[in-house]
Image (cartoon, coloured by chain):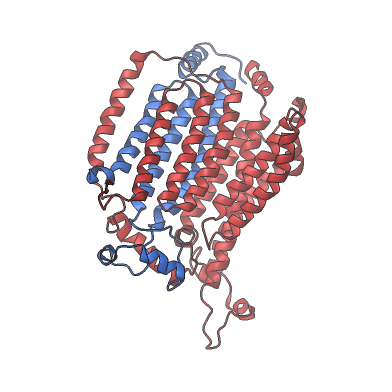
Amino acid sequence: MITLPASINASLVLDIVLLVMLLVVAGAIVRTRSLLAAIILFGVYSMISAIWLVVMDAPDVAFTEAVVGAGISTIVLLGAILLTRGETEKSDWRKLIAPALICAAVGGVLIYAAMGLPDLGDASSPANAHVGRAYLEGTAKDIGVPNMVTAVLASYRGLDTLGETAVIFAAGIGVALMLGFGPRSSLASPPSNLGDRHVTLRVAAKLLIPLIALFALYVQFHGDLGAGGGFQAGVIMAAAITLHALVFGLRETMAAIPSRVARSVASLGVLIYAGVGVVCMINGGGFLDYDYLFPPAVEAQIPGWILGDGSHAPHWGQHAGILLIEIGVLLTVTATMVTVFYGFAGRTVDDARREAKR
Amino acid sequence: MSFFAMHFNYIVVVILLMAGLFLVFSSGNLIKRMIGLAMFQSSAALFFISLGKVSGGTAAIAVAPGSTEARALASQLDPAYVAQVGVEGVVYSNPLPHALILTAIVVGVATLAVGLAIAVRIREAFGSVEAKDIDVLSRVEATQPGPQA
C-alpha cells in the first residue's frame, strides 16, 4: 500500500482534482468557437468551482456560485447571444501570437511571485492571523450569531455590503435603461413559450417553483445560523421567478410581478438597508451600529430584553439589525435579477432588427 | 512535491487569470470577451478563498463549545498541530475572504449583465458584435454624417 506524505490528505487530493477539472473546462472555453458551447461550459465551470468552494470550507460562497454561475449568468448570457449571433469568427492564428506571448510572460512572472506566498492552509499566514482571527474570536462576544461569514458580511463590514447592494441596484437600473423594462406593448409578438408544447415541463415546474421559493426563504432566515443569507436567497428566488417565465411565458410572469413592482422593490431593498443605518444614528450610535437599533424606551417594552440583574440581553440589536438588512439585500438582489431578466427576455429579436433598421 | 502541492492552487489561479485575459485580448467577439472577463474575475475569487483556507479547518459556522459535534471535530485534529496553531477546540477557516467573495460574485453577475446589455445595443446599432466590424462601421459613420437616431 502506498502511504502518502502527512501533508497530503484527502481534502488536498480533492482540491487538486477539482482544480485540474477547472483547468480542462477553462481550456475548452478558450478553444471553442461556438458561443453556445462556451456558455454551457461556463455553467459547468461554475458548478465545479462551487464544489471546490465546499472543499475549501466556504459553503456560503458555494451556494452563491452554484445559483449565480449555473443559473442566472447562464440565462443572461443565453439571452445575449439570442439577440446577437451564435458563433465567433475564425481568427487568424498570426494575430493570436502577441496576446499569447503577453499572457505567457505575465503568467510566468505571477507564478514566480506566487511561489513566495504562504502554503495552502497556513494558519499563521498574514491573511489568517490578524484581522481574520480577530473576527473569528470576536463574533461570539460582539455579534452573537453562529455563522461568522454573516457576522462579517452584515455587521462588521456592513458598510461594504451596503455599497455592494447599491452597485447591484445600479447595475439593474443600467440594464433596464439600455434594454427596456420588458416587452413593449406596441410591438406585441405572439407569446412563444416552452410550456405550450411540453406538459411534463409545465407540471414539473409547477411542483418545483414553490419548493425553490420556500428554499430561498429558508436560506434567507437561516442565514445567521448556517450557510445562507440575503444574497444567496435573492438569487435563488430570482431563479424561481426566471424558471416561471421560461416555462409559462414572460407575459404570465409579468402579469404576476410587473416590471414597475420589480423596480420599486429593488430600490426599497437599498432603502431598508440604509434606513437601518440611519435609525442607528438617530438612536445615538454610528451608521449601521446595530447595538443602537432600538431606542431605550422601546427596549424596556420588549419582554426578555432587561435581564433579572438589570443588564441588557446581549445581541438583540445585532440580531434584529442583521435580519432587517438581510431582508433589504434579498429584496434588492431578487428584484434586480428579475429586472435584468425582463430586460433581456423582453427585447425580442424583432425589436433588435427593427432598431437596427432605424 | 509537497511544496508544489501546497502552491498548486496559486498556479491554477494564475493560469485561469491568463486564460481569461487571453480571451479578452484575442477574441473579437464581445460576448466571448465578457466570458473571458467573468473567468478573470472568478480566478480572483479562487485566489481569495485559497488564502483563507486553514488546514484542518471547517466552515466558519460556530459549533457550540463542549458539544458532541465540537468534540468530534476537535478529535480529528493532530494535537501537535493544534498546539502549533494555538487555538482551542475547533479550527475554523477565515470568514473574511468568504464574505468579500460572496458579495463580489453577485455584483459580478450584475455587472456582466450590464456589459452584455451594451453588447446587445452595439449589435442593434452596428449589426455585429465583432470588434473589427464595429471598428470599420464606426469609421464609416464618422466620415459621413448619418441621420441622428
Q: Does residue B89 sit above or below A181 in this rendering?
A: below
> Does residue A333 show up?
no
Tell me how many marks there are. 0
- Which quadrant of the view contains residue A342? top right
Which residue occupies 28% across, 56% down?
Answer: A126
- Which quadrant of the view contains residue B126? top right
Q: Please identify the quadrant where the C terminus of chain A is shown.
A: top right
- Would residue B35 appear left or right of A335 to someone viewing this image? left
Which residue occupies 67% across, 48% down?
Answer: A264
Residue A354 position in % (x across, y down): 67, 19
Residue A187 position in % (x across, y down): 75, 25
Residue A86 position in % (x across, y down): 55, 20
Q: Along the line of sight, which residue is nearer the eye, B55 or B108?
A: B55
Which residue occupies 53% across, 63% down?
Answer: A225
Q: Colour of chain B?
A: blue
- Would residue B25 appear left or right of A278 to someone viewing this image? left
